[in-house]
Amino acid sequence: MTGDKRVFIKTFGCQMNVYDSERMAEALAAGGYSETTAVEDADLVILNTCHIREKASEKVYSDLGRIRQVKEARRRQGQNTIVTVAGCVAQAEGAEIAARSPAVDIVVGPQSYHKLPKLVADARSTGVRVVETEFPDQEKFAELPARTTPKSPAAFLTVQEGCDKFCTFCVVPYTRGAEYSRSVSDVEREARKLVQGGARDLTLLGQNVNAYHGAGLSGDVATLAGLLRHLVSIEGLVRLRYMTSHPRDMDDDLIALHGDEPKVMPYLHLPVQSGSDRILAAMNRRHTADHYRRQIEKVRTARPDIAVSTDIIVGFPGETESEFQATLDLVGDIGYAQSYSFKYSPRPGTPSATLGNDVPEDEKSERLARLQALLMSQQAAFNTAMIGQTVDVLFERKSRNPGVLVGRSPYQQLVYAEAAATMIGEIMPVAISLANTNSLSGTVKLF
Ligand code: 5AD
Ligand code: SF4
């Protein structure tokens, strides 16, 4: 069918939402929708939302205010606009969104994206608003159309969804549900399709990806290490990554894989959240600071140059200055190449939201600033150490500067270098001459 209608998709939050947005776009393309970056041209607007922190959630409502204006302006010109809220805010707030925002036609949770084309067609023909936030029995992945060409040679592939860990601050077990793993054969089929379409670097995604336990090829249950060992045999696939992992599920086989499988990239995102054992227990993290330190030690023994990244929350209820200091100590000991750090944000429905004993906002801000100063200096040091080295870069896209491409090093760093656009999708050695906190630059070394 020709693309006679347009869809505008805005993605908030994590990589899984990026992946989901791509799959929604693909599902809608089959019904004649092509993507637009101009909201005023869109017959269908989708906000793929994030509920992890309050800020992310609130952004959705301010966007919906503006979208309502666009919808009304289009209506005056006789054009209909279907407004859809997808993602984790949709799952968590459901009908409340429709009540709060009159412009919204469809509210659809992450487990129901395969139904989206029908929901849109129904909304268009009947004008009836719908809220679809069930966790259906049948598998959404089986119902979604097969993948088309990926947008970038570095592609995402969701292999696991949901989480059974129930950290006390986190909405994920409620918005994405219980842990579910796709089968090895299903993942392999999608991986092959992506590689055929030009992907060279795949990041396997899951809210708790190293708890992966999908059906294996011979009636067994595969671990993440088993899945990775299987995928490395795909010709044309040269880089594999995975995120996000839990320290408790980092088994010895997965650790060993970093040492013996060159296609598995030397990059590990392993959230620690806090360096204080009392806070970790209150967070129900199921690991101590020492356990985490030992896990990193093992990973570094297997792969000494591995880049480690993490997530940290400051100002969890009751966090004292000395407990925060324990986080700084742990960060100082580990030395992170990359990180994401946040002020604690109480989320409705999570156990920690009712703990009381909140750390005052200015204290949280002050702690976050101190932590980020340390983390940024570690990241800058990691990048600076690359100067003079030659690293393999997979070029992903053009940069804003004419003639300059952007790619990634094995350690997940952004690298800029002059190269022809035909080199997108190729891996080239780049001699690094410049480093700053967020990126590297260098020269392609052909000979
Ligand atoms: N407040 C602040 N940060 C949070 N995260 C998850 N829930 C919250 C919350 N309530 C952070 C954690 C997690 C990352 C994705 O977001 O660090 O690893
Ligand atoms: Fe949330 Fe991650 Fe904890 Fe699961 S392991 S509850 S996704 S922070």
Image (cartoon, grey):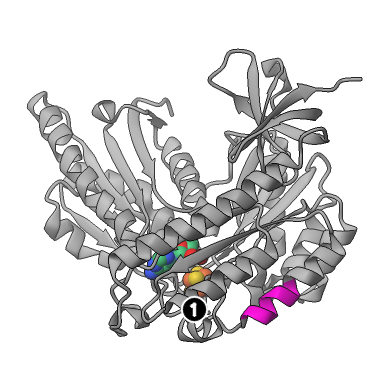
x and y percentages locating residue 444 in the rendered image: 79, 22
- Quarter of the rendered image showing ligand 1: bottom left
Left or right: 382 in relation to 10:
right
- In which quarter of the view is residue 402 placed? top right
- In which quarter of the view is residue 446 placed? top right
Q: Quadrant of the C terminus?
A: top right
Residue sitting at 28 percent across and 83 percent down?
Answer: 356
**Front one among 35 and 341:** 341
Seen in the picture, residue 6 relative to 228 is either above or below; the reply is above
Is residue 109 visible in the rendered image? The answer is no
Residue sitting at 44 percent across and 68 percent down?
Answer: 314
Is residue 198 visible in the rendered image? The answer is yes
Left or right: 115 in relation to 213:
left
Q: Which residue is mark 1?
A: 323
Secondary structure at badge 1 equals helix
For disc 1, does the CB lie below 8 Å from ligand 1? no
